[in-house]
Amino acid sequence: MEKVRFDFERVFNDVVGQYGIGRDELESTLDKLVDCYRDLVRRHEENELGFMKLPYENFSHLERIASIMRERYSQLILVGIGGSSLGVEAVLNAIFYRQNSNFVVFDNVDPIKFDRLIRHIDFVNACIVVVSKSGTTLETIANFNLIYRIFENVFKEDFSDRIVVITDPVKGPLRKFALSKGLKCFDVPPNVGGRFSVLSAVGIFPFYFMGLDVDSMLKGAKSAITELEGVNKKHPSFMLAAIYYLLYKKGMNINVYMTYIESMEKFVDWFRQLWAESLGKDGKGQTPVKAIGTVDQHSQIQLYNDGPRDKVVTFIVPERSLVDFTIRDPLLEDFKYLNGKSLGNILVASYEGTRDAMTERGIPNATLYLSNIDEEVFGYLFMVYEIAVALSGYLYGVNPFDQPGVERGKEITRSRLSI
Ligand code: PA5
C-alpha cells in the first residue's frame, strides 16, 4: 500500500554487526512461512479462524443502526477493555487527535479515572456501547453496571434505546442481560479472538457512529490480504514475523515501538497487546515496549543505546508533514540554524539522529513510514500485524490465539471479591 512503507535495512548483520540477522537466514525463515501462511488460509477456509474474513463481511446493519443513533446522540461511551477497546481507541485517538471529546472509554476500574470521566458525560446526548466478547470481564461488567445505574437515575424512564451490546452471539451473561432488557445486540464472531476483533462489530460499530469511512478501512485491510496473493514473501507480515523472530533468537527479547507520530501512541498500545498476549507463552515471547519520539529520547535512549543488548527498535515516522510550523528569526543567537526550519524538520532530524546513532551502536532497528493517518492505513496496519503475529505463532511454536496465562489471576481476583 502506497501510504505505508517499511524499511528493514538496519536489521541485518552486514549493517549493524553481530546483533543483526543474516540475509540468508531471513530468506530461509521466509521460505518456512510460506507453508505457515497456507495453513493460516486453510484454517480460515475451515472456519477455525475468522479474522482474515472480516474485511469481506457485510456491515450494512451496523451502518444503519449507527446512523440512526448518531442522529439522536452525539457522545459515545465505550465500555470495554483489551481487545474490546484498544483497536477502537487506536483509530479514534489518531484521527480525532486531541479534538474530539465525543468519545469516552471506560476500561480500567480506577475510581479516580471513573470519577473524572463520568463528570464529562453529557447524559442527554450520550449512548453506551458495551463490548465484551466473553461477557464475563470483571472491569467491563463493573463499569457498565455503574454507568447503567447512573443512567437509570438520570432518565427515570426507559433508556434501552441508548445502549448497544457487542458480545458472543449466544453465550455469556452479558448476552443474557441484553436479551432480558431487549437491548440492541451485535456479535463478536466466536472464531475471532478479542485482540483480533477490531474489524468486527467491536470496532466497526463505533467507527460508523463516529462518522468514519469504514469502506476505506476495509479496503485497506483487504489490500493487506491481496498483496499476499501468490504468497509474496517480502510482504510486511512475512518480514515482521521473520525478522522479529530471528532477532528474538539472537537475544533481542524486547521489541520497542518508538513512535515519532504521537497520535499513533494508542496504535502502539494495540500492537503491545497483540504481541504480548499472542506470543508470550511456554517460557517464550518478546516483550513489547512503547516509546514516544522525541520525548523518550530524553528518557529511554540512554538505556537503549548503552544498556543490555536485548532490544530491537521499530520507529513510526511521518513520510511527510501533514501540518507544520516554521521558525522565522530565531530568538537565540546559538540557534540561528533553526531559521526556516519547521517542527516537522526537527522531528524527522531527531528521528534520523536517534536511528543513525543506534545503527552505529549496532542496535537492530526498522522504520514504519506513514504518509497519511486515515482509515485505509489503519485497516491495512491492523491486518498486516494480525497476520504477522499469527505467522509468528508458527515460528515460536505457540498458539497465538489463546491466553491461558491470564486465567489464574482472574480466578484469585474473583475469589477475593466473593469473600
Ligand atoms: O485478546 C483477548 O482475548 C483479551 O485481551 C480480551 O480482549 C480482553 O481480556 C477483554 O475480553 P472481553 O472482550 O471478553 O471482555
Image (spheres, rainbow, N blue to C red):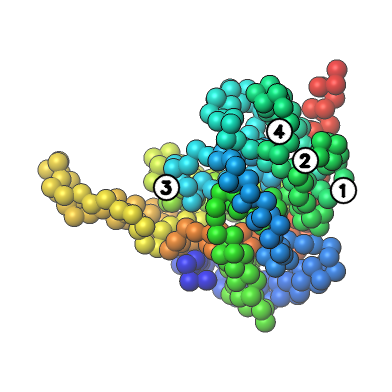
- Is tag 4's residue or tag 1's residue first in the polypeptide sequence? 4
- Identity of the residue drawn at 12% across and 43% down: 333
Residue 311: horizontal and vertical position, in percent?
55, 51
Which residue matches tag 2?
183
Which residue matches tag 4?
159
Which residue matches tag 1?
170
Residue 165: horizontal and vertical position, in percent?
74, 43
Where, by quadrant of the figure, is residue 224 drawn?
bottom right
Which residue matches tag 3?
293
Q: Does the beta carbon of the residue at mark 1 sit less than 8 Å from ligand 1?
A: no
Q: Does the beta carbon of the residue at mark 4 sit less than 8 Å from ligand 1?
A: no
- Identity of the residue drawn at 67% across and 65% down: 55
User: Viewer-proximal residue, 20 or 115?
Assistant: 115
Residue 114: horizontal and vertical position, in percent?
61, 26
- Is tag 4's residue or tag 2's residue first in the polypeptide sequence? 4
The image quadrant where one finds the C terminus is top right
Residue 89: horizontal and vertical position, in percent?
58, 45
